[in-house]
Image: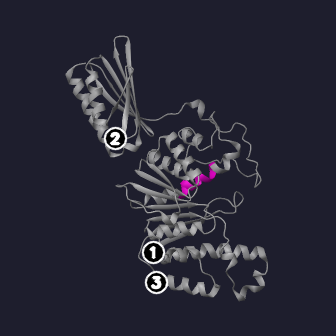
């Protein structure tokens, strides 16, 4: 290939190098095809242990991005044509060159149309809770087709590209979760990495889905940290991240109170963390002065065993009413504490109560300094109800040791 076009290839590769260095976690692979007459010579590179392993002509070598592009450029001189496919999450970039022309094109990654089917039978999910879960007539944020690799890895989709009947409810839930967080995430600075901490992450489905959405749909830089006390679920999350090639994730089997972040945390999320584990997650978010705290609580045992209010004795003698009141008081006092700590709080219905009774979401966005009036009101309520909430206790504990 002539020197002029080799120089153009080198210029395009310099742009890709800058792209890689800006956010290497997006890089998936690089495929190079050289042509000389009717013969083709192929090379393939994958990220491995902080380097790129590039196989060409039966030989595998380790390169950093700069030395790899030098190698590819040098080899291009020997051939009539070269096609360089640089793949990152959600985007393919193709450089094609011959002696007449050099061009670069960007395309959104396409999925085989044969793998984009949704549940042919259109039947509702049938489980021990309800028969209400069907695919909804809505524009999904996590789209079948584009997100197939993700949906298959987290078990929502079958190998043949159909949403599993018994996972439709889960699919609807995680997609609605993304919808509710979309506006919140837009308020975060665009010129920095968004660090998201998932407390009590379990199998980390929401972190994987948010990672996909932020990275491949919104094109935002992000990093995810998953915490859970169970080593087995953490190992499962690590394996899924490896299978998906999501290198902007880390997972730790650790008690939330023992975790010490090495970076600024922008968002703390917690989904269905049992009983006071939700309070622990909220407390950590407050202690870290996180920009945003999102919690979808689970069971409420603590307040039920504590609270009493004499004017309501005639009502609270009914166990089911006392339990429901405990739920309201728990979420209400959590919200008050967040407001006292300077957060703008909204409590919304996360998903239909027909899907799950644990359907409230607390969204808190840091907007101001602490509010002493609300804190005083909170303390008075503690006395009136004869309660000592775990959130208050956690906030006053020293977690530094």
Q: Is residue 327 visible?
A: yes
In this figure, what is the number of numbered marks? Answer: 3
Q: CA distance from mark 3 to mark 1?
A: 10 Å
Q: Is 159 positioned to the left or the right of 75 in the image?
A: right
In this rendered view, identify the residue nearer to me: 344 or 341: 341
Q: CA distance from mark 2 to mark 3?
A: 47 Å
The residue to which callout 1 is attached is: 342
Identify the element where label 1 is drawn: loop
Identify the element where label 3 is drawn: helix
Q: CA distance from mark 2 to mark 1?
A: 38 Å
In this rendered view, identify the residue nearer to me: 25 or 364: 25
In this rendered view, identify the residue nearer to me: 124 or 323: 323
Q: Which mark is residue 309?
A: none
Identify the element where label 2 is drawn: helix
- Relative to 390, residue 235 above or below: above
Q: Residue at x 27, y 17 (%)?
A: 78
Outermost residue, top direction? Answer: 38
Q: Position of residue 212 (x, y in %)?
A: 49, 46
User: Badge 3, how many Cα within 10 Å: few under 14, some, many 20+?
Assistant: few
The residue to which callout 3 is attached is: 372
The residue to which callout 2 is attached is: 20
Residue 145 painted magenta: no
Q: Is 184 positioned to the left or the right of 131 in the image?
A: left
Q: Position of residue 342 (x, y in %)?
A: 45, 75
- Of label 2 and label 3, which has the lower sequence position? 2
Which residues, given as a range, are shown in magenta?
A: 171-180
């Amino acid at each position: 290939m002539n020197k002029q076009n080799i120089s153009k290839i080198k210029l395009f590769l310099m742009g890709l190098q800058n792209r890689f260095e800006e956010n290497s976690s997006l890089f998936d692979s690089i495929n190079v095809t050289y042509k000389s007459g009717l013969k083709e010579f192929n090379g393939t590179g994958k990220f491995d242990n902080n380097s790129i392993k590039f196989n060409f002509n039966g030989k595998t070598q380790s390169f950093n991005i700069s030395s790899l592009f030098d190698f590819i450029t040098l080899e291009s001189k020997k051939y009539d044509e070269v096609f360089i496919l640089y793949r990152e999450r959600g985007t393919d970039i193709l450089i094609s060159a011959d002696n007449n022309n050099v061009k670069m094109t960007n395309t959104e990654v396409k999925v085989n149309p044969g793998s984009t089917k949704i549940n042919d039978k259109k039947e509702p999910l049938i489980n021990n809770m309800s028969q209400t879960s069907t695919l909804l007539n809505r524009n999904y944020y996590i789209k079948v087709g584009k997100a197939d690799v993700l949906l298959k890895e987290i078990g929502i989709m079958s190998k043949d590209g159909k949403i599993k009947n018994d996972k439709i409810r889960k699919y609807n839930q995680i997609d609605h979760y993304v919808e509710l967080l979309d506006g919140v995430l837009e308020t975060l600075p665009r010129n920095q990495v968004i660090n998201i901490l998932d407390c009590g992450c379990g199998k980390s489905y929401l972190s994987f889905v948010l990672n996909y959405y932020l990275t491949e749909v919104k094109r935002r830089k992000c990093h995810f940290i998953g915490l859970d006390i169970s080593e087995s679920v953490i190992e499962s999350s690590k394996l899924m991240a490896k299978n998906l090639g999501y290198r902007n994730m880390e997972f730790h089997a650790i008690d939330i109170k023992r975790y010490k972040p090495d970076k600024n945390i922008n968002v703390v999320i917690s989904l269905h963390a049992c009983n006071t584990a939700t309070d622990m997650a909220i407390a950590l978010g407050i202690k870290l002065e996180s920009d945003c705290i999102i919690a979808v609580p689970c069971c409420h045992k603590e307040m039920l065993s504590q609270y009493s209010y004499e004017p309501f004795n005639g009502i609270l003698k009914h166990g089911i009413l006392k339990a429901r009141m405990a739920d309201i008081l728990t979420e209400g006092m959590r919200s008050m504490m967040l407001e006292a700590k300077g957060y703008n709080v909204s409590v919304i219905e996360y998903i239909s109560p027909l899907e799950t009774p644990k359907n409230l979401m607390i969204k808190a966005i840091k907007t101001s300094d602490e509010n002493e009036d609300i804190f005083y009101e909170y303390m008075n309520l503690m006395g009136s109800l004869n309660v000592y909430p775990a959130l208050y206790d956690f906030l006053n504990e020293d977690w530094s040791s």
